[in-house]
Image (spheres, coloured by chain):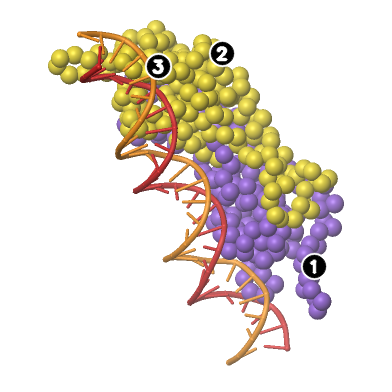
Chain colours: A purple, B yellow, C orange, D red
Amino acid sequence: MKLSANEEYGMRCLVRIAYNAQGLTIPEMSQAEGVSPAYAAKILRVLRKGGFVKAARGKEGGYTLARPAENIVIGEVMDALGGKLFESDFCDSHSGQHAICTRSVDCSVRSLWRAVQVSVDQVLSKTTLRDLMQNEEEMNSFVRMIPGPNGLRVM
Amino acid sequence: MKLSANEEYGMRCLVRIAYNAQGLTIPEMSQAEGVSPAYAAKILRVLRKGGFVKAARGKEGGYTLARPAENIVIGEVMDALGGKLFESDFCDSHSGQHAICTRSVDCSVRSLWRAVQVSVDQVLSKTTLRDLMQNEEEMNSFVRMIPGPNGLRVM
DNA sequence: AGCAATCTTGACTAAAAAGTACGGATTAGC
DNA sequence: GCTAATCCGTACTTTTTAGTCAAGATTGCT
């Protein structure tokens, strides 16, 4: 029961994009998050396939939110990045004896997992990307990378 | 954010032991859970090192609870089996830019993880092994493996 | 058209988790 | 003291996840 790397970096990337309405490129994201460009690309692909960000190719390209931050529910993002907490059909597929399960369908351990899942969902399904964007004024001082003759300044 | 195999099988094994006051051996557990004896042994070792079960060697040996079920808090078991949800020092160790974090210590994504953790802990720290043992009368009909001249019957 | 910046994709390598194998140590019963 | 049933520990193999690489496709600019 650990956050996967996909979830950790995926959420971080999404928040960064939310803060940068003009869009962020893979090299920019790579530098901001301290991961390789290839890895940043891989994470951003998951977010794109999930429909949370959209990409523009070519010069002036980059990633932006696919919809307003208040319409992006974190629970959906997490599902896309890391899948569900447990497989709901474990009891069917596992080859052990089922006698310990009460009343032929359910068992105490399964109930526990479901309780945990419900508890997590209550947080994640209530939270939108907008909710994670506090101190937006401060954040807006982060500007886009400006290429210049004497080096680069990021954000 | 998935339950690990250790967590799934560890909890299942613990519940089975709780239901069998006389103790369960590795072969018994292996058969009951449908996993190899070697794997059952590995899982039981984690539970033993965590102080939740104790083992008796030799003939008539096996695993029993190390303390009463009502004194075993599931949150502690889960920690022993699968570790914490996230590393609390991620922000220190990761090499990306920290500017997105508010006020130099915290950041929105971290807050989210903490909220999830709190939510999970509320379930797991309130639940004891005893709470998972419903229908105990029914369960007590499961008896120990009885070796006999004409084969074995398990539970 | 040509170039440079950008995203896209699939295949590859590395690390971690899951699961197995085996030789050793302990105990009960005879 | 011998034997059989049991746990113990380490090292190994397999599978999954994490992370890299390289060739291709798209776009804006001149």
Placement of B139 over or under B30, stated as above or below: above
Q: Is residue B84 above or below residue A58?
A: above
Instruction: Read off the residue under disc 3.
Output: B56
Q: Quadrant of the N terminus of chain B?
A: top right
Give the CA distance from mark 1 to mark 3.
65 Å
Q: Earlier in the sequence, mark 3 or mark 2?
A: 3
Mark 1 or 3, closer to the camera:
3
Residue labelled with disc 1: A153
Q: Nearer the viewer, residue A128 or B117?
A: B117
Look at label 3 and name its amino acid.
Answer: Ala
| Other residues around mark 3 within 10 Å, as few (<14) / some (14–19) / many (≥20) | few
Look at label 2 and name its amino acid.
Answer: Asn
Residue B114, given in percent of the width and then of the height, sits at 69, 36
Q: Nearer the viewer, mark 1 or mark 2?
A: 2
Task: Give the residue type at disc 1.
Answer: Arg
Alpha carbons under labels 1 and 2: distance apart: 57 Å
Secondary structure type for disc 2: helix
Q: Quadrant of the C terminus of chain B?
A: top left
- Along the viewing direction, whichever of A44 and B127 lies nearer the viewer: B127
Q: Examine the rendered structure and indicate whether residue A86 appears above or below residue A21.
A: above
Q: Which of the two discs, 3 and 2, sits closer to the camera?
A: 3
Q: Chain of mark 2?
A: B
Query: Residue at position x 81%, y 50% from top?
Result: A136
- SS at mark 1? strand
Q: Secondary structure at mark 3?
A: strand
Percent position of residue A34, x then y: 68, 58
* Residue under numbered circle 2: B71
Q: Residue B124 appears at what percent x and percent y?
A: 58, 24
